[in-house]
């Protein structure tokens, strides 16, 4: 058997075994705590609300396990039966250029993997999210979103993938990986900076926040911390989901602060200002830039590693390809890299949690009070049915944010 396939199988198995163990630990932990609301929240969240959040956590975890129990065997059957190579053989039969064949290959594979995961996506939205009152989407809206998303990914994906494959084909003996990286970095920067202006409006309506005390207070805090902003908007997030959120998007003069209408309706003015000050903290403390650079660094390293093995026959044989090609290399890379990088996830989560603590502290210093931040966090936890009692190992591994309790404890110390 192919040694690369064995290595991949080991990483893949380790990844999923660990995932199952952590999920199991977490569900057990939650069950052991379900009889009583954690003491801090006793006067803030009822036992009924707490138990509802536990059921929500459990339902989501179960769906995750079931979907992986279906998807994993299908994926491995595809690898071991030589399916990926057979589709390649079929795509080549059209006699098109290497780039066009690559586009056909990726189109078929993306559609296939999308279809496999589709029942679980639908179940998550229309059954689980519905059950807990979060889903506000009709099937019609879902379909419109699907069509728009498909057109958008074609409009962006086809030219970008064509360019990537072209660079790979033409510079396979020199620095293709560097050129591809520069191209992808440029595309990413371009999309991130234009995101709130050209992409968000395709799906949502952004309304400038009306003049009034909230806008005044946001402006005042931005001025105080020297945060340059070019607009505060509310977004009709409630037409899809009752989950609430806020985000900063775009760069330069396209930078926007976007508040979900669900958030504006749930939090008081002071709490909203605290949440925004936290987001400003992420920007001013350069967390956003660090994240971006880290992502770019990882992809540069990944592409470089791929360049070292891209001409080795065992690389293609492992996934059942009979003929090497740029698109096959890219496909294997996309499918395999996740398992090899999985064990870096806790490091990234740790860094992200450190940033969250820093942004919380920043917000408190900017506002000069801890109360609004804490109250806002409790409300968000309650509204979103967040798990109040995750297993420490589970949250250590996966959580990009510290648990609410950890954040509140840290806030109370400032
Ligand atoms: Zn944050």
Image (spheres, rainbow, N blue to C red):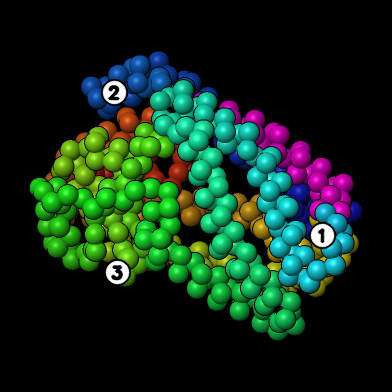
Disc with the residue nearer the chain's start (3 vs 2): 2
Label drawn at residue 45: 2
Q: Name the spot of residue 134 as percent of width and height, x first.
A: 41, 30
Q: Mark 1 falls on what kind of element?
A: helix
* Figure quadrant of the N terminus: bottom right
**Does residue 320 appear in this view?**
no
At 25% from the left and 34% from the top, the residue drawn is 266
Which one is in front, 37 or 413? 37
Quarter where residue 158 is shown: bottom right
Categorize mark 1 by other alpha carbons within 10 Å: few (<14), some (14-19), many (20+): some
Q: Which stretch is magenta?
A: 58-86
Identify residue for label 1: 91
Note whether 31 is above or below 176 in the view shown: above
Q: At which x and y percent is residue 360?
A: 26, 50
Picture layout, residue 249 above or below residue 143: below
Q: In which quadrant of the rendered view does residue 38 lie?
A: top left
Do the CB atoms of the residues marked 2 and 1 lie less than 8 Å apart? Answer: no
Asked whether, in this view, residue 386 is left or right of residue 65, the answer is: left
Residue in the picture at 18% in, 60% down: 222
- Asked if residue 19 lies left or right of residue 275, the reply is right
The disc, 2 or 1, on the residue closer to the chain's N-terminal end is 2
- Measured as percent of width and height from the top left, residue 164 is found at 65, 71
Q: Considering depth in this image, is 11 or 335 the residue closer to the camera?
A: 335
Q: Tag 2's secondary structure?
A: loop
Pick out the residue farthest to the bottom. Answer: 174
Q: Is residue 294 rendered magenta in the image?
A: no
Pointer 3: residues within 10 angstroms few (<14), some, or many (20+)? few
Residue 367 as seen in the image, left or right of residue 296: left
Q: Mark 3 points at which residue?
A: 253
Residue at figure coordinates x 28%, y 55% from the top left: 257
Q: What element carries label 3?
A: helix
């Amino acid at each position: 058997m192919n040694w690369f396939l064995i290595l991949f199988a080991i990483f893949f198995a380790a990844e999923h075994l660990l995932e199952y163990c952590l999920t199991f630990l977490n569900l057990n932990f939650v069950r052991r705590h379900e009889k009583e609301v954690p003491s801090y929240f006793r006067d803030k969240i009822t036992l009924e609300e707490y138990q509802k959040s536990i059921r929500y956590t459990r339902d989501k975890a179960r769906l995750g396990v079931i979907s992986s129990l279906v998807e994993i065997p299908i994926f491995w059957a595809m690898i071991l039966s030589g399916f990926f190579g057979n589709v390649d053989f079929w795509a080549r039969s059209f006699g098109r250029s290497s780039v066009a064949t690559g586009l056909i290959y990726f189109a078929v594979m993306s559609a296939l993997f999308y279809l496999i995961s589709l029942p679980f996506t639908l179940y998550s939205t229309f059954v689980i999210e519905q059950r807990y009152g979060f889903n506000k989407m009709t099937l019609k809206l879902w379909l419109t979103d699907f069509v728009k998303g498909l057109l958008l990914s074609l409009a962006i994906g086809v030219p970008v993938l064509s360019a990537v494959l072209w660079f790979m084909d033409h510079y396979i003996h020199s620095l293709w990986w560097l050129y591809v990286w520069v191209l992808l970095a440029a595309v990413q920067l371009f999309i991130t900076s234009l995101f709130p202006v050209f992409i968000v409006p395709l799906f949502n309506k952004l309304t400038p926040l009306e003049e009034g005390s909230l806008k005044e207070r946001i402006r005042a805090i931005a001025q105080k911390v020297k945060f340059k902003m070019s607009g505060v908007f509310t977004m009709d997030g409630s037409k899809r989901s009752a989950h609430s959120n806020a985000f900063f998007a775009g760069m330069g003069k396209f930078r926007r602060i976007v508040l979900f209408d669900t958030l504006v309706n749930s939090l008081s003015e002071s709490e909203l200002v605290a949440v925004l000050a936290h987001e400003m903290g992420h920007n001013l403390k350069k967390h956003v830039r660090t994240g971006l650079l880290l992502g770019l660094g990882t992809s540069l390293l990944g592409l470089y590693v791929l360049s070292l093995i891209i001409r080795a026959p065992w690389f293609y044989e492992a996934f059942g390809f009979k003929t090497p090609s740029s698109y096959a290399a890219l496909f294997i890379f996309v499918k395999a890299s996740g398992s090899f990088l999985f064990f870096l996830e806790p490091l990234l989560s740790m860094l992200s949690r450190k940033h969250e603590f820093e942004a919380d502290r920043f917000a408190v210093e900017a506002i000069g009070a801890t109360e609004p931040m804490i109250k806002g966090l409790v409300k968000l936890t309650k509204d979103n049915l967040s798990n109040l009692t995750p297993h420490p190992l589970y949250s250590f591994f996966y959580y990009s944010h510290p648990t609410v309790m950890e954040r509140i404890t840290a806030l109370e110390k400032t």
